[in-house]
Each structure stands twice: as structure tokens, then as C-alpha cells.
Image: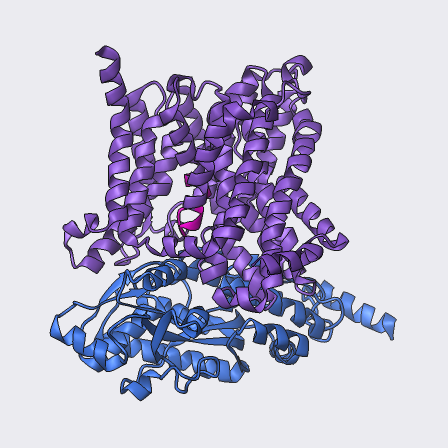
């Protein structure tokens, strides 16, 4: 039997075709590309899930996290899209930032170049104001903006064209008001500016606002999710405020397209099992990571939806 | 607080946790002294390994690595003129000159002790002053950061070297390089030539390494001396005790520590700025400022002390507000989260033993550094200089290449390293100073983005730039620094 497999393997090799035996996968270390610098949110998420995926991929599975930061993620994502689809290169992609890049038309990849594997995290956007702000609800800030055109400055942690900026444009369109965005280019500086009262309002992701909001140092006046967050049940959603803005940052795993279906199934199962591992769940809960698992097909549907929404926004208000 | 501190003491001094701190300090020394490899990279690799460990074991390693790494950068800066980290660039100015004069051991000792004193004072500030200092850091908005950047740029005056026009040109080159990349307010690409890798601008760490690590190597090759530095010139054995000269160094240490702590608690300023500002201040008040840059031990003391004082202080806003004061603090925050420790005021209530334990670990690792750093510098790294330069040069280049590649895992950075290295070498042969290039590069983008933010927020009113007391103070300080040389000249001629 062993001899037979060996002979079969040799024949396949001689025929110039390495045997794509999914049973044997993974036979060598898997590279997991992270398009951001070490220590960031995506990096920490990748490094922690990688350990548990190794456990459930079985055998001597090894996953090496490789950081390829730069150009807002574009460098790393290009590397994933262009990698050999053999299951040994996978990576984290971040919607809707990645969809926006494709729609702007500068990216060297299309969304169809990726084979979604699983989504892990959904972190909704929030609009926050300093604790002593006169604005207590979304309509207050909208009214102020209508009074003096562009008089309300909203700090954003992203750059021009980031998912937060796009969410802000959507809010503007729905509210028929005009805000002035101030681009801080990172979460730490915008959080400091809103805490110190240097900007009247700011957008960031829920997980980044959670602690200081709970302590009452800032107020969350709108969460951009369909339902209220379990982590901050007192904060109203944008929908409740009368503006249907749903936006947030996601983190999920994708592979280059053309990867064999049985390998996707293996990876998908490993992520699913890892996310159910009590030890991992416990750590994620303590760190208050907003987990949201989507399997390969659901994740693909989600990504397609994000692209459609953004295309509509791009037509109405191009962000660049 | 005192209660929590007392509770934390036995945890910090548990044998396993002492071991963790020692490992951290040694690992920090290693990543610090290899140019290109930074503490940030070291910590990012460390964090997932600590996943299942006791929090204080993990945090002890992190504290040790932070403190060890900040001194580690000074070792090659002094011995080989190759700064191991961006923060040790200012140490090169006088440190390497001292080595050339045969005072290598003394310079290392000054650097070590100054760094330790800075770290210790900074740790004490972290433990005692966290709450009031946090509210101070919140006073800084875009307007204040803009002026802080201007203040930093004003210190260029002390780094210009002997030839004023060349120094100014060097600073202009730095500002120009800093302008490369995407404009974050409107997405316009500047000088990127369609290169994806340039969208975020040049990576400061890659540039600094190219600028500072490659030219000395090329020079070594050029000289192609087949012998090492003679043993007697190296003088790594004791050359008088810095401790005994504490009276002489004390004013520099105190001033530099205060500067380092203040810069540390301001998110976004960071280590290299602390060391430059401290160096400049030491030079400004010195009786013989012209000896700076020619091997004045006070220069080394100021730079390293400012750098050390930056460390623990940068964790004040990180622990209390969740706003990291430096790249390293950002990674440490990630490490805290992995252990379920969410930064913020509640951290002090919910996990006082761990928070105060972590702070104590900063203090303890600073003191450990005094012993481990001294041994490492003289016993191990110092001996490297005895190698023939023809052997040493390629070895340094190898480490630099690995270090730079590990920053972004990008081959593009290696080409930048090579290009900038050669340009740096040419500039050096033409007697252009490198330090002003660094300041221009680091501060240009900060000044620009903060100015634009300030004007966006104020609705375009320029008067807003001098609307707060801190802004006015910083503006006046910058003016004072710029006018000091002129005033001194005036007084001398009078």
C-alpha cells in the first residue's frame, strides 16, 4: 500500500504534476500575510487565530504570520491576490477598505481575485463627541451643520477615502447636511483630540471607543450597526437616530482565487473550530474583540454586498 | 496606591518573573544594537509567545525589552558610529568622537548610566504622577503639536556643524524626503512616481539606517585597514567612574529627564525627538557649546538620558487612556489586550496589582540594565571592534540588511537602503552633516499634517495658532532657541 502511494506519487511527479492531495495538506508551513504593521489590530488578530488554526488543521501544521504593511493595505493585499493558489499563502483582508480601493480603480487586483475563506471580526463605526459636548443626539449635530455650512468639524482616524470617511459621506447624503472632515491618519491621535476637546466630534471603530465611552470620558451618539452592540448597550444606533448608516471594519481570511475547494473547506473548518475553542473565546471576550464568524459562502456574499454599496456611493459622491 | 504597590512587590520579585525581566533586558539589548531591528519588531514577535503565560511574566519581558533596547542602540552608535535605533542618532554626534579619542569605555559608561537614570526617573514619574500627567497630555491638540514640531526643527541650529549653508541644505533635503507620499487630507500622491511602496512615504527607519549605517561601512572598506582597533586604544577597562562624577552630570541628567518625560507622555512625539531636544538643551546651556560634536561626554549623557526618560513615560497615556505615546507603547497595548487587560482608568481599579507590578518592572529592569548593559557592552560588543575592519564591514552590512528587510518584508526597502547609503556616503565626503536630514525627515510631515488639521478645525483662521497658552510658550521657546547664537555673538563682541 505504502509502495503503491509512493509509486503513484512518483508517477505524478514525473508527469510534471505535483499531487494535490488535500488529505496531506498542509505539508509545509502556511504563510499568512497581514497587510499592516506588527502590533496593530489586524496583526494581533492574525497572530492569535493562527495558533488555534494550527491546532485544528492537525498534524504538524505551521502558520507563519508575515507583515507586508504599506499603502493602506494595498501592498499586502496585492501579494495575497498574486500568490500561487496552492493553499500555502493566505492572508487577512479588511472590508470595506479593500473594496474601496478596487472601486477607485487603482488597485492591481479585483475582488474576484480573492477566494474568501472566513470572516472573523466585525467592528462597527461610531460617532463620538467629548463628554461636555452640546450635542447629545445625531439630530443636534445635523442641525448645527445645517446652520453654518461646513461649520461642524468631524475628526476621522482614517485618511481620505477610508471606510470611515465613506461612512461620513453617506451620513451627509442621508442627512442633507455638510460636515468638514479632519483627517488624523490614525486612531491614537484622533482619540486624543476628542478626549482633549480639540475637535467637536470624531469617528472611529466601536472597539476603539469602548473603554473611554464606558468611563464617561466621551459620548457615543451613534453606532453604525443594524442593532445595538452587546458591549455598549446604552449607545443608540444610527438607524434609531433616523439615518440608515451601517458601516464598520471587518477582518477576514482570504486566499488567492483558484485554490482547490477541499483546501478551502479545510481552512474554513479550522477557523470555525478555532473560533469555538473555549480558550480562544475566553481571550477574545476578555479583550472585547467583536467576533463575527462568516463561512466562505456567506463571507463572499457579504463582500459582494459591500462592493455594490460602495459603487453606489462612488457614483453619488466620489471620495477622491 | 501604596497598598497596591506593596501587593505588587512579591509578584514582581517571584523567581520566574525575575527571569522574565532578565530575558527581556538581554533580548532588548540584542535587538537594540542591531541597526534596523527595533524594539517594536522584537515585541511583536514576543507577544503571541506570551499568550498562555502569566501576565506579569509577559509584561516583565516587555518592560525589560523596552529598557534594554533603548540602551542597546547606543552601543554601536558609540563604538561604530552606527546608531542601533533612531533614538540613538544624537548619541553618535559625541559618542563616536569619544571612541576615536580612545574613550570608548567612558562613553559607554556615560551612556549606560545616563540611560539608567533617565529610565528610573521616568518609571518613578509613571508610578507617582500618572493621573496629573495624563490631563497635561490632553491639552495637546493639533495646534500644540504643530509648535512642538517647530520647536524640534529649531533645534537644528545646534546640529548644523561648522558650515551653516551645508547644514541648512541638509535640513532641506530631509524636509523634501519627508514630503514624499500620499497627502492624507485629499489623497493626492506626491513624488511617488506610481510606486506603491512610496505611498506612505519613505520608511523613517529604513532611511535612517541607510543614512547612518552604510556610510561608516563604506568608509571601513575604503580604508581597508587589515588590523582592528589596537587594544590599548579601545580601553574597555575602567576609565574613572561616571558615578563619582555625579556632580558634573547631575544638571544634564535632570534637564534631560524632564524633557524626555514630557515628550514621552505626548503621544506622537517619540524617542528620537526626546534625545535631540535633550541634546540641544544641553548644548544651549553649556559654557562651551563648541565642544559638542567633538566628543563632549555631556552630549552623550543628554541624548541617552532623554531617550531613557522617554520609555516609561510613553506608557502613561497608554495605560491610563489607551493612547499609545510611541510605536513601542502601541505594541505593548496590544500585548496587554491579549492578556485581557484593557487600558483605561478602570485598569487601575480592576487590576491594581498588575498595573503597579508592571510599573515596578520598569523600575527594576532599568536597574538590571545597569548591570547587564555594562557587561554586554564591554565584554561582548566591545570585543567586536578588535576584528579587522575588512571582516567587520561585511558583517555589519549583513545585519543591517536583515534588519531593514524585517521592517516591512519588502525588497524595495533594500534598494532604498543601498541608494540612501551611497548618497549618505557622498554627502559625508562633501562634509554635509546627517543629523539635520533626520530632523527634517521626522518633523516635516508632523508639522505639515498638524498645521493643516489645526487650520481645518479653526475654519482657516491663522490667529488660532497662537490661541492657547501652551502654543504661545512653545512658539516663544522656539524663538529663544533660534536667537541664542545671535545673542551670544552680540554679547561676545560687546
Above or below, comparing residue B199 to residue A48 in the picture: above
Above or below, comparing residue A209 to residue B25 in the picture: below
Give the image quarter of residue A130.
Answer: bottom left
Q: Position of residue B449 (x, y in %)?
A: 29, 51
Horizontally, residue A229 falls left or right of residue B175, namely right
Q: Can residue B24 be seen in this view?
A: yes
Residue drawn at the location 34% of the way across and 38% of the way down = B152
Residue drawn at the location 44% of the way across and 80% of the way down = A232
Give the image quarter of residue B103.
Answer: top right
Q: Where is residue B412 in the image (x, y as percent from the top left)?
A: 47, 46
Q: Residue furthest top?
A: B493
Above or below, comparing residue B141 to residue A101 in the picture: above
Horizontally, residue B288 falls left or right of residue A4, namely left
Q: Which chain is purple?
A: B
Tell me what hue chain A is rendered in: blue
Q: Where is residue A320 in the image (x, y as percent from the top left)?
A: 25, 64
Nearer to me, B446 or A173? B446
The magenta span reads: B264-273
Give the image quarter of residue A286.
Answer: bottom right
Nearer to me, A123 or B2? B2
Above or below, comparing residue B377 to residue A248 in the picture: above
Horizontally, residue B188 falls left or right of residue B328, namely left
Amino acid at each position: 500500500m505504502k509502495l503503491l502511494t509512493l509509486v503513484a506519487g512518483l508517477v505524478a511527479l514525473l508527469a510534471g504534476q505535483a499531487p494535490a492531495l488535500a488529505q496531506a495538506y498542509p505539508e509545509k508551513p502556511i504563510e499568512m500575510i497581514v497587510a499592516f504593521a506588527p502590533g496593530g489590530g489586524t496583526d494581533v488578530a492574525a497572530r492569535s487565530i493562527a495558533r488555534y488554526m494550527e491546532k485544528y488543521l492537525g498534524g504538524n501544521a505551521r502558520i507563519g504570520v508575515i507583515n507586508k504593511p504599506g499603502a493602506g493595505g494595498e501592498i499586502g493585499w496585492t501579494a495575497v491576490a498574486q500568490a500561487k493558489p496552492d493553499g500555502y499563502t493566505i492572508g487577512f483582508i479588511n472590508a470595506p477598505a479593500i473594496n474601496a480601493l478596487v472601486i477607485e480603480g487603482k488597485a492591481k487586483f479585483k475582488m474576484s481575485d480573492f477566494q474568501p475563506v472566513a470572516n472573523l471580526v466585525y467592528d462597527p463605526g461610531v460617532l463620538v463627541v467629548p463628554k461636555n459636548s452640546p450635542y447629545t443626539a445625531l439630530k443636534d449635530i445635523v442641525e448645527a451643520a445645517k446652520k453654518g455650512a461646513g461649520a461642524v468639524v468631524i475628526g476621522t482616524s482614517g485618511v481620505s477615502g477610508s471606510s470611515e470617511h465613506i461612512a461620513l459621506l453617506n451620513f451627509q447624503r442621508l442627512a442633507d447636511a455638510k460636515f468638514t472632515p479632519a483627517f488624523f491618519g490614525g486612531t491614537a491621535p484622533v482619540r486624543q483630540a476628542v478626549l482633549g476637546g480639540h475637535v467637536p466630534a470624531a469617528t472611529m471603530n466601536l472597539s476603539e471607543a469602548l473603554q473611554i465611552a464606558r468611563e464617561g470620558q466621551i459620548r457615543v451618539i451613534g453606532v453604525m450597526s443594524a442593532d445595538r452592540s452587546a458591549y455598549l448597550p446604552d449607545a443608540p444606533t444610527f438607524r434609531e437616530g433616523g439615518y440608515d448608516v451601517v458601516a464598520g471594519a471587518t477582518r477576514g481570511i482570504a486566499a488567492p482565487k483558484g485554490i482547490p475547494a477541499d483546501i478551502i473547506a479545510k481552512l474554513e473548518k479550522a477557523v470555525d473550530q478555532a473560533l469555538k475553542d473555549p480558550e480562544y473565546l475566553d481571550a477574545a471576550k476578555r479583550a472585547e474583540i467583536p467576533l463575527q464568524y462568516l463561512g466562505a459562502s456567506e463571507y463572499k456574499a457579504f463582500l459582494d454586498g459591500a462592493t455594490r454599496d460602495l459603487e453606489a456611493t462612488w457614483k453619488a459622491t466620489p471620495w477622491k | 496606591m501604596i497598598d497596591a504597590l506593596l501587593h505588587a512587590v512579591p509578584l514582581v520579585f517571584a523567581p520566574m518573573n525575575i527571569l522574565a525581566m532578565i530575558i527581556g533586558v538581554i533580548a532588548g539589548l540584542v535587538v537594540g544594537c542591531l541597526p534596523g531591528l527595533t524594539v517594536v519588531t522584537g515585541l511583536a514577535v514576543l507577544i503571541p509567545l506570551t499568550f498562555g503565560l502569566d501576565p506579569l511574566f509577559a509584561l516583565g519581558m516587555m518592560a525589560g525589552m523596552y529598557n534594554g533596547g533603548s540602551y542597546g542602540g547606543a552601543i554601536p552608535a558609540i563604538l561604530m558610529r552606527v546608531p542601533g535605533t533612531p533614538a540613538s542618532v544624537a548619541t553618535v554626534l559625541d559618542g563616536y568622537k569619544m571612541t576615536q579619542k580612545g574613550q570608548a569605555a567612558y562613553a559607554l559608561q556615560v551612556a549606560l548610566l545616563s540611560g539608567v537614570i533617565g529610565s528610573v526617573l521616568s518609571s518613578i514619574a509613571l508610578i507617582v504622577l500618572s493621573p496629573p500627567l495624563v490631563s497635561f497630555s490632553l491639552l495637546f491638540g493639533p495646534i500644540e503639536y504643530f509648535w512642538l514640531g517647530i520647536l524640534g526643527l529649531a533645534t537644528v541650529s545646534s546640529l548644523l556643524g561648522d558650515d551653516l549653508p551645508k547644514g541648512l541644505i541638509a535640513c532641506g533635503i530631509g524636509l523634501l524626503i519627508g514630503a514624499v507620499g500620499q497627502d492624507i487630507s485629499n489623497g493626492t500622491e506626491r513624488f511617488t512616481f506610481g510606486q506603491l511602496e512610496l505611498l506612505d512615504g519613505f520608511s523613517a527607519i529604513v532611511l535612517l539606517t541607510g543614512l547612518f549605517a552604510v556610510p561608516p561601512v563604506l568608509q571601513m572598506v575604503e580604508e581597508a585597514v587589515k588590523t582592528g582597533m589596537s587594544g590599548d586604544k579601545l580601553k574597555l577597562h575602567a576609565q574613572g567612574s561616571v558615578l563619582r562624577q555625579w556632580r558634573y552630570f547631575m544638571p544634564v541628567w535632570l534637564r534631560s529627564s524632564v524633557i524626555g518625560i514630557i515628550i514621552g507622555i505626548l503621544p506622537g512625539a517619540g524617542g528620537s525627538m526626546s534625545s535631540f531636544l535633550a541634546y540641544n538643551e544641553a548644548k544651549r546651556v553649556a559654557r562651551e557649546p563648541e565642544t559638542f560634536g567633538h566628543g563632549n561626554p555631556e552630549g552623550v549623557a543628554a541624548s541617552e538620558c532623554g531617550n531613557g526618560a522617554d520609555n516609561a513615560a510613553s506608557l502613561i497615556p497608554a495605560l491610563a487612556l489607551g493612547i499609545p505615546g510611541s510605536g513601542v507603547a502601541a505594541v505593548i497595548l496590544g500585548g496587554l489586550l491579549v492578556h485581557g487587560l484593557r487600558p483605561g482608568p478602570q485598569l487601575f481599579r480592576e487590576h491594581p496589582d498588575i498595573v503597579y507590578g508592571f510599573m515596578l518592572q520598569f523600575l527594576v529592569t532599568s536597574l538590571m540594565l545597569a548591570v547587564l548593559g555594562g557587561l554586554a557592552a564591554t565584554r561582548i560588543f566591545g570585543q567586536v571592534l578588535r576584528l579587522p575592519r575588512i571582516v567587520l564591514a561585511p558583517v555589519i552590512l549583513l545585519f543591517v540588511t536583515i534588519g531593514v528587510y524585517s521592517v516591512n518584508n519588502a525588497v524595495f526597502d533594500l534598494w532604498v537602503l543601498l541608494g540612501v547609503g551611497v548618497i549618505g556616503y557622498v554627502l559625508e565626503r562633501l562634509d554635509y552633516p546627517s543629523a539635520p536630514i533626520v530632523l527634517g525627515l521626522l518633523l516635516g510631515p508632523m508639522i505639515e499634517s498638524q498645521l493643516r488639521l489645526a487650520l481645518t478645525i479653526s475654519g482657516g483662521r491663522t490667529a488660532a495658532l497662537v490661541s492657547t497658552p501652551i502654543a504661545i510658550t512653545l512658539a516663544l521657546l522656539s524663538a529663544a532657541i533660534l536667537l541664542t547664537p545671535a545673542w551670544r555673538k552680540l554679547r561676545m563682541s560687546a
